[in-house]
Structure formats: C-alpha cells, structure tokens
Amino acid sequence: MNPFFRDTMTIAAKELKQLRRDPLALVLTIMFPILLISNFIVIGSAFRSTTHDIPAVVANLDNSPASAELLDELTTSSLIRVHDVVQTQAQAFREVDAGVAVGAVVIPEGFGIGLAQGHTYVVTQLDFSKATSAQIMYGEVRSAIKLLLQKAQHGELQFQVQEGSVEIITIPNSGRPPNGDIIMPGFLGIIVTLGAFDDTVNAISRERDRGTFPRLILTPISMLSIYNGKMAATIVLTILRTGLMLIILSLNGLVVRGSLILVFLTTILIAMFTLSLGLVISSRIRSSSTLTVLEIAMTFPLFTLAGTGQSPLLLAPQGKAIALALPWSYGNDALRRVIYLGLGLPAIGGDLLILTICSLILVPIALKLSVRTM
Amino acid sequence: MKILTDSIAIAANEFRQFRRNRASVLISLLLIPLFFTVAQGAGRGSAGSSYSPTADIPMVLVDNDHTLASARVWQTLAGSQDFHRLTQTSDEHAAIAGLGLKKYYAVIVIPKGFQGILQSSELNSTQARIILYTDDSEPGFTSQVSGTLTNYVQNFDPRIEVQPIVSELQLLRGRIGGVEIIRRGTSFPGFNIGLTVILAIVQIFAVFYEIAGGLSREREEGTFARLILSPMNIGSMILGKTVFDLILSTIRTFTVLGLGIFLYRGHPNTQIGTILALSLLIALMTMGLAFLVSALKIGLRAVVILEFFLVLMLYAFSGLLIDKELLLGGAAVIANSLPFSYAFDAMRRTILVGRPLLSLTTDLTVMVTSIVGLYIFSYILLFRFRERLAT
C-alpha cells in the first residue's frame, strides 16, 4: 500500500480509537446531533402546526346577524383564541397595548348594513412586535371574512356580495403540503457543520492542549497524511451523524425524495469544507475552548445567512452577497434539492463542486499555517 | 465592608486576566457582537431602507390567454418594483420543468379564458384565476411570492390602462369582496425586531462562557483551590465576578447598539438607559445560571456545549425565533416557565413598542425574582460543594 494512504488510514484509526476511549466525547458525538435535531423539530413543528392559540380580542359594535356570523367564524378558528369580546374599540385596543392579546378585531357599527350594500370594513389592531403571530392573525381575519362572503353567496345568509376579481392558486413544484419540513435539510446541514467544527477541536486543539501534537508531527508521518487521516475520521463520523439524523427526520415524517448517496455525499463535502476551515482557524487559535466558542459564534449567523431557515434569495442585497460567498449556502441548497425535490447529481453538481474546490484551497493554507506556527 | 474590598479585588483580578488574553478580549467584546449584528443587518437590511425580497428573483409569466386583460397583468407586474426579473415565455411545460433547477423560481400562468371570466365576473360572482407554480425548496419563498402577487392582482381591474403600483396604504387596506380590512398597529423594520434578539443573545452567549467557563478554567488550572483557601468568602467571589462581567456586558450592549444604530440605522423606540437596564438584567440572569452550572463541577468543554444548547433552547422556546403564542403543549409550558421568555418580551415591548420599562410589572417581577433565586441557589451550592470543587 502507498505509504501516504497507509499513514492516512493509521491516523484515521487513531482518531476513532481515541473517540471510542473518551466516553464524554463519544456521547457528545451521538447526543449532540440528537439534541440539536430535537430542538429543530420543535421549531419546525411550530411552523407546521395547523392549530395555534393566538390570543385575540373582538369588539362587536354592530350586533347584526352578519357581525354575529363573523364573530362565530373567529371564535371557531383553529389558529386564534378569542379570549374576550368587549363592548368598545378602546377596550379592545387597550388589551393589545397591555400585551394580553396579540390582536384586536373591531366589527364596526353598521357592518351588517354595509355588507348588504357591498361595502363595509373591519378594523384590526395588531401587535407587530410578535410579527409571525400578528401575520397569522391577520390572515385568519381575512379567511373568516372570505368564509362569511362565501356563505352569503351560497344564500346561507340574507345578502349577496361580490368576491375579489382575481384569485391566485399556488402550486408548489415539490407537490408537498406547505409545512415546516422544508427547513429540515438546512438544519441537517448546520448539524453537520457543527459536528465537523467539533471534530476540528478534537483533532487539533485537544492534541495541542494534551501536548500530543508535537509528538505526532515528530513521527515520520507527513503533515498532509495527518490532516487527511483526521479528515477520514470526520468522514466516518459524518456518515454516522447523517444516518442518525435521517432516521430521526424520517420518523418525524420527512420523506427523502432523492438519492441517499447524494445526501451523504453532500454532508461529507460540507463536513470536509468545515473541517478545512477549522484547521485554518486552529492554526492561529490554540486553546480548544476558545476555538469552540469562536466556532459556535460563527455558526449562529449561518442560520440567517446560509439558507438554513430562510432562502438566501429573500435576503437583503448585502445578505444575499454574503450568502453567495459562503460555501455552506451551496451545501444547504444541494441538501434541499435532493431531499425535498428529489433532484439528481446534474442539478446539484455545481454546489458540490464549489464545496470541493473551497476545501481543496483551504487544506494547503491550513498546512502552510500549521507548519509556520508549529 | 470587607466583602466589598474583596469583591473589588476579585473584579480587578478578573480584568487583569481578561486583558492579558487577547483572543478573549477580541471574541467577547468584538467578534460575538459583530457576527450577530452583521448577520442580522445583512440578512434583513438596514432599518431605514426597504427592499423587495422578490425583485431580483428570476420568474417567468406564461400568457395562455393572449388578451388585453392578460397583457395588462403582465404590464402591471413587469412595471412593478417587485418583479424586476420577470420574463415571458409561451412554453408552459418547459418553464415548469425549469423549477428546482435555479433557472426560474416561479412560473405565473394566466390560463385561457382569463379575460372572459373577468368580464363575466362583473355580472356574476365568478372569479378569474391565475396559477402560480413555485420552487418550494426555497424556504419562505412560496408564501412571499404568493403574497406579493396577490397584492397586485387581487383587485385587478382590466378596464384600467395601467394598474396602480401597490402603495403602503393599499397594503394596509386589504380588500376582500365588499369588505375592507383596515390594519392598524405599527409594523417594525425587520432589523429593529432582530436588534432585540441580538442584544439578548449576545449577552447570554458571552456572559455564560465568561462566568461558567472562567470558573471551570480556574478549577482546571488549580487557581480555584487557592481562591477558596484565601480568607475571601464565596459571596465576595460571586460579587466580584458579577461586577467584572457587568462592565463587560455594558461594553457589549453599547457595541451592539452602536453597530445597530450607526451601521444599520436601527431605531430603538426607547431610551438607551432602558435598553442597558434590560440588557444587564438578562446578563445577571445568565450569570446566576452560570454560577449554578459551575457548582456542578463541569469541565470547560462541557460548559461550551451547554452554552450552545442553552442558546439554542432559548431560540426554540422563549419567543426569539417563534412567538411564544405559536407554541403548543409541552413547548408552551416550557416557554412560559423560562424567565428568559419574560426578558425577551420586555425587550420587544420597550425597544419596539416603546412601553416604559416600569409598566411591565409581570416581566420585571419574573426577572428580578429569578435573578435573586438563581444567585441564592448558586451561593448555597458553591458554598456547600466548595471543597469538592477545589479538588
């Protein structure tokens, strides 16, 4: 066997052996992704849920059959909970100001007559410091009005009204129902990233802390073999982590449409890029705990900028530019396309190539810096 | 008096050690505030500026109707500020097949008979339809583009030569059939909402590591045992470290506010003093928790991992990422039991809504009670386990 590959395999075997002997590190390697994904599932399920309990207050100033019907639609909503029906607009607004309700709906006097004549209005006062809840509530008020109008058109009520002129029918190309599943591939990407950062800390900084790194580089094994060996160990761990994540995600109802091999290939490339970057950083920052804090601090912005929870397409121009410059964005994008849409290699080849090239650029830099700061 | 002089000595010692560690100074006071603020500002844009999320996304319109009405839909969208990269094609199947391949992200199809239905809708209640195919592998994109498109075409009038560009006022006056919805309540720029999150998270992130990590490091280096053997009591140590970290927290608050206000034109709706007070209350709550964790004799690495989970848990359960009101069952119970949820609520209500801090009695009571509780509990545990911690 080529000595380079033999040395690489030796280092990889050593890394895995050390991990097996360190119960805390082993537990963290397995528990870390499980705990993370559990957290993300909670986040995803909040978006996926078809029922919510958003507190609302209604002021019915009309007392007509039409306003009673609208009030009925609002109180039977599965998204908002009308906890109070008050007599005045001011009372309703006060409850929103006090933070007791996320929104107030005011059905004005003359609502029923106005509706029969084809023109009336409803006032909503929303607390936009809780932006998502306020938007959901606004949408629910719209739906309640729409339902009221439909009933009127079907003759269930005593008046005829006209609908808006154009309706939009949205058809997502995945054919999946709109839910929180779409953020899961991005979260898989971020877990792999964090795992690989953790591997960096294990691979280099801890060796430095224990004083074993100088001994390792004094052996006849080349620096490139050492780094490659550590990468090989990370690949094995990434495969384990990805497999574990996919099982948990599948148990939670996420259907992986594309090839599993492509999912594993993408996560491996994300991990290799992250490890390469970690190796560069670890050549300058020696303490393992400082390195861990820095890497975690670096990871949180990735939630916003690398397409984890929101598409980079929707970011502000500066954010979009940063997202384009971050190789993790391409990894997350590839994961979404494979897992969610079931696309193949031709569709994600560019993304994988970018990750590979970035890793290939960073490893020599890490080697050079490590030799210099040895 | 002795407790005060001892505390000052501890705080001075902490500062000396901190100053000597360049990496810590850089990470704690600059990099953490910078990473979080820039990520937020770059992602959501400056508070003073507005941008259309859909403007630069390639989309295609398929006109199967070829009538004046469908041409006017195209004219309306193409001339708007939200569809700069909208192109036309006649091949509907190819356009839809291009979804997911990053060629187009949405296909807007005007079906045959669109104008006919619009004209007949003046006589009966039939609605004309536009079909929107979207690449839903982009999180958040489908709802964004569907909402924007709805704003333009919902009350489309084929008789008007050029459709008016949707104004802010029109957006606030949604209209369904004969019912207008007047939407009241101030909408806040995304960055201002983000600023409340950053201020809280930066403090929690840095403070937990400085306190729990600092104590773990002292234990691992053996200086904790020497500190315990000195005539100082545990209370002085806790107070000294608290004073030290409150000063760092103040600097961090001003760093985030400085970046937010001057770089991203954030506009807090309250006084700086209120923000600082709330920020320090969050820091104190985190310190109490960090002292408590330190009493459990955990290593530095475990501290970092715990810190990560703490921040992540707060993201999930305390209303930072998802409003507390959207959580159900066990998640809602956790959210309502976390004192941090009340702190974040107070942050939003003061910085965004402009409520005076002292009017938020529930939030303040929960915060102060939890700080006192955590400190007392930490003191008892640290005092009880001091020998075990020193060995």
Image: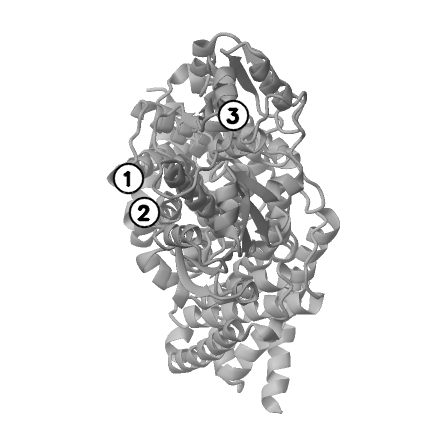
**Sequence-earlier tag: 1 or 2:** 2
Q: Which residue is mark 2?
A: A34
- Looking at the picture, how far across and down is residue B221, in whole percent? 49, 66
Callout 1 secondary element: helix
From where the camera sits, is residue B264 visible? yes
**Depth order, front residue of A116/A241:** A116
Q: Does residue A328 show up?
A: no
Position of B177 with respect to B329 (left or right) is right
x%, y% of residue A10?
A: 34, 33
| Chain assignment, label 1 | A
The quadrant of the picture occupied by the C terminus of chain B is bottom left
Residue A225 location, x and y as percent?
43, 29
Q: Nearer the viewer, residue B58 or B27?
A: B58
Residue lying furthest right = B262
Q: Residue at x 35, y 26 (%)?
A: A175
Residue beneath disc 3: B122
**Residue at the spot 45% in from the left edge and 26% down from the top edge:** B124
Q: How many marks?
A: 3
Badge 1 vs badge 2, beta-carbon distance below 8 Å: yes
Few, some or many C-alpha atoms within 10 Å of disc 2 (few <14, some 14-19, many ≥20)?
Answer: some
Residue A75 left/right relative to B161: left
* Residue occupying the point 62% across, 67% down: B355
Pointer 3 and pointer 1 on the same chain: no
Q: Which mark is residue A244?
A: 1
Q: In what element is the residue under mark 2?
A: helix
Among the 4 quarters of the image, the one containing residue B7: bottom right
Disc nearest the viewer among 3 and 1: 3
What's the distance in space between the residues labelled 1 and 2, CA to CA?
8 Å
